[in-house]
Image (cartoon, rainbow, N blue to C red):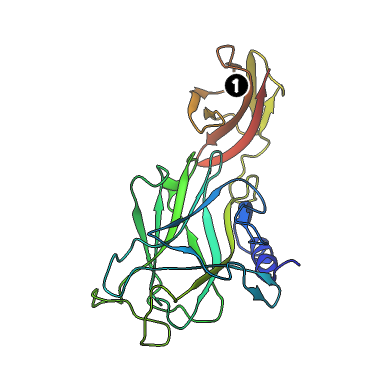
Amino acid sequence: MKKIYSLMIMALSFTTSQAQTAFTQWTFENTTNPSSGTGTLTLIGGTAEASTAYPTGQTGLAYSISNFPGDTAASGTAGYQFNTSTTGYNSITVSFYVSGTNQSSRWQQYEYSIDGGTSWSILGNNNGDLTTTFAQKSFNLPAACDNVSNLAFRIVSIFAQPTNSAYESIQGGGYNGNNGKWLIDGVTFSYNTLGNQQNEIAGLKIYPSPAKSYLSITSDNFSEKQLTLYDTLGKIALTTNVSNQAVDISSLSKGVYIAKITEEGKTATRKIIVE
């Protein structure tokens, strides 16, 4: 059964001023694999699936974990980590639904990494607002997360602020790292829809497709454009400035590429096949 959470996210994507399109999503219907797109989920800091990893809710299943650190230990280390690729995408948003049980930490911290998890930057925390009822969280990730081959996002438990000395449970006392559980659902990574009215390059055409030795790029505006081609690993294969001349791509290997075109502050992305 489809979750109401997923339906709400889809509805929101059509009402925002810059429409968002999901490229990776987890709905946790008896699996930790993405329901769409590609990515991985890792439990970090010693956490593990709860005894009922997929507890039944009103409209489907959610993913539950427990085995968090002891009361005054290892703040900011334990929780969920999601990895996915944003190659060819920009204006990345991540959204999800979370809740907990009475003995779990009510404080969560949200972090991102653009190198797969080697180094982390903090987005912020939830100000201790986790409850036993599912609530949606949504973050617009910084531009550094655009077009990254291995983006990581994690949700970790932290000591209660501003004391920073111990965890605080949802029920206001009786924190238990082993028994307290977090539940998560509808984890969705989205990007700013290419071709939306606010940021599309008018009349943009890239041809031929498939291409062999050259690409032609035209638009209604004859201004100079910047072209960057990314391979499937997110590495830059070619970058150049182009006006109306054809671009020599004879040195590229056969395969699929993402072309990012920028003209007078507007950006568009297209998939290119090289034969």
Residue placed at 63% from the left, 61% from the top? Answer: 28
- Image quarter (top left, top right, bottom left or bottom right) of the N terminus: bottom right
Residue 121 appears left or right of 96: left
Residue furthest front in the image = 51
Three-letter code for the amino acid on which mark 1 is drawn = Asn
Query: Which residue is identified by label 1?
Result: 244
Residue placed at 57% from the left, 31% from the top? Answer: 232
**Viewer can see residue 60:** yes
Please, is residue 266 above or below residue 101 in the view? above
Residue 20 appears left or right of 163: right
- Position in image of residue 151 (x %, y %): 47, 46
- Position in image of residue 128 (x %, y %): 39, 78
- Label 1: state its secondary structure: loop
Please, is residue 242 above or below residue 99 in the view? above
Residue placed at 66% from the left, 61% from the top? Answer: 30
Residue placed at 43% from the left, 79% from the top? Answer: 129
